[in-house]
Image (cartoon, rainbow, N blue to C red):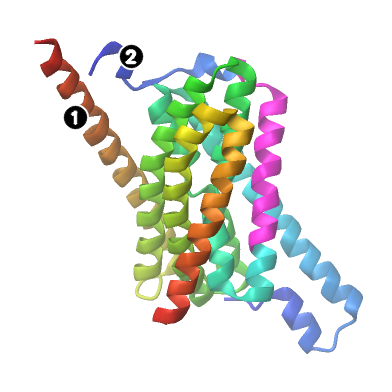
Amino acid sequence: MTPSRKIRIQPSRLKKVTRRDMVTRFVFGAAISVVAGLIGHYRGPVTGGVFLAFPAILAATLTLIEHEEHDRVPAAQDARGAVLGAFGMTAYAACVWTLGSRIPTWIALVAGLVVWAVVSAALYFLVWGLRRDRRGRHRR
Amino acid sequence: MGPYLGTVEREAGGGLWEAGLSQWLVLSTRGLCGGLFVMVFALIGELVTPKQFAGVFSAAPAVALAGMSLTLLFQGGPQVTESALGMIAGSVAMIAYCASAVPLVTRLGAVGGTTAALGVWIAVAAACRALITVAG
């Protein structure tokens, strides 16, 4: 992987996170959770479940990225990664729906989370690995 | 597991005030947990680079994990399974949202692009939900 594509964990980046960032994300998450709960209560769990996949994190993140970096490119890059995470989210939902009636539900939720992580990561390495190989071939 | 608190209060003929309080308690707990889970996943996304990989955490099932955990606690497993079926529809819409957000954000900026992409989410989610009704 080229240096710019290497996955790194950088705890120092947390210093750049402001209270406003966290409050914005908390509010987005809290609001959609309440809405999903209300819809589930009045319209049934299936309809309420649709809103469990509402793009709460991404909407907040994209606006914060552009506000802080005054640039649309990082926001667009974040959205590209989110496409892969969304495939993982679909796998999570399918896993919980399939397993929820067969095994203890809390185990199905944990399994779903693992499936989300594995599918998202696998897609990331597949997509960005392919792009790196294609770029390498063009340079030769 | 336990029944929905608000429903129990109403069926038992409990006062409207108690029913309302239980419902507010449940909703407040949902809001608090949902907000916290979203914050945690967003923080993880802030920790990692490059931005494309961090974006994966922007589509984490944070709200779902919080909501489903509380649904399991208050209403039981079957309700969680049913909500997961609806979530499949929402997740397909999420894929469409993220894919459309890339060109829309580039063209319209984050606020404009996000708002426009939300229209895509709503349309796709409604179509998938209707498909579930027809198929069910």
* Chain label for disc 1: A
Residue A125 % position (x, y) = 25, 32
Q: Is residue A16 magenta?
A: yes
Q: Amino acid at mark 2?
A: Ser
What's drawn in magenta, residue-wise? Answer: A15-36
In percent of width and height, residue B97 lies at 48, 46
Q: Amino acid at mark 1?
A: Leu
Q: Secondary structure at mark 2?
A: helix
Left or right: residue A108 compared with residue B90: left
Which residue is identified by label 1? A130
Query: Element at badge 1?
Result: helix
Q: Chain of mark 2?
A: A
Viewport quadrant of the C terminus of chain B: bottom left
Dot 2 corresponds to which residue? A4
The picture quadrant where one finds residue A123 is: top left
The answer to whether residue B127 is left or right of residue A68 is left
Q: Is residue B86 left or right of residue B34?
A: left
Label 2: how many residues lie within 10 Å, few (<14), some (14-19) or many (20+)?
A: few
